[in-house]
Image (tube, rainbow, N blue to C red):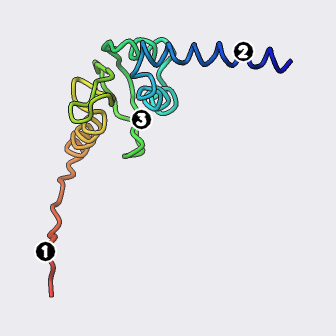
Amino acid sequence: MEWTHREERTKFNEYMDKIQRYFPYVDKLLPLIDFCRNTLKFSERVVQELCKLKKVRLKGDFYSPEFNRKFRDESAAFSFEEDKNRKGHYHICVNDIPLVQWFRQKANEWRNCLGITPTKQDKRLKI
């Protein structure tokens, strides 16, 4: 039984080594995959296409944990893009801009539709 376990473990380690050699970015994509599945509620098919580093055009409501609300888009092109500042790291992009920035843009559009104007706070120290 112990010998069988060792043999299985050796095969598993060889398999993992191949994955790391031929798909070095897989570790960096796992958190993005979890976010897409659990937060954005993407289907398995959509996540698979994103993992192939392809753009996927979607329409619907997309949930932002930062703003605790959904934002609608009729033609959003989602993709996993390599971070230009950190080689080997990836982030989710929508229409070629990072997801966080896209959500902030959508939140500003929503506020403007409601007539809410952003107020700048005076950050100077008053004595």
The quadrant of the picture occupied by the N terminus is top right
Which of the marked residues, 3 or 1, is nearer the chain's N terminus? 3
The three-letter amino acid code for the residue at tag 1 is Arg
Alpha carbon distance from label 2 to label 3: 41 Å
Q: Residue 99, percent across and down? A: 30, 33
Element at label 1:
loop
Mark seen at residue 63: 3
Question: Is residue 103 depicted above or below 82 in this figure?
Answer: below
- Provide the secondary structure element on which disc 3 rests: strand
Q: Nearer the viewer, mark 2 or mark 3?
A: 2
Q: Nearer the viewer, residue 59 or 96?
A: 96
Q: Residue furthest front?
A: 3
Q: Are marks 2 and 3 in contact (CB under 8 Å)?
A: no
The residue that disc 2 covers is 8
Residue at the far right in the pictured view: 1
Q: Amino acid at mark 3?
A: Tyr
Residue at 28%, 19% in the rendered image: 77
Residue 24 image position (x, y, % from top left):
40, 20
Task: Please state if 42 lies on the left or on the right of 5 as rendered.
Answer: left
Report helix, strand or loop for mark 2: helix
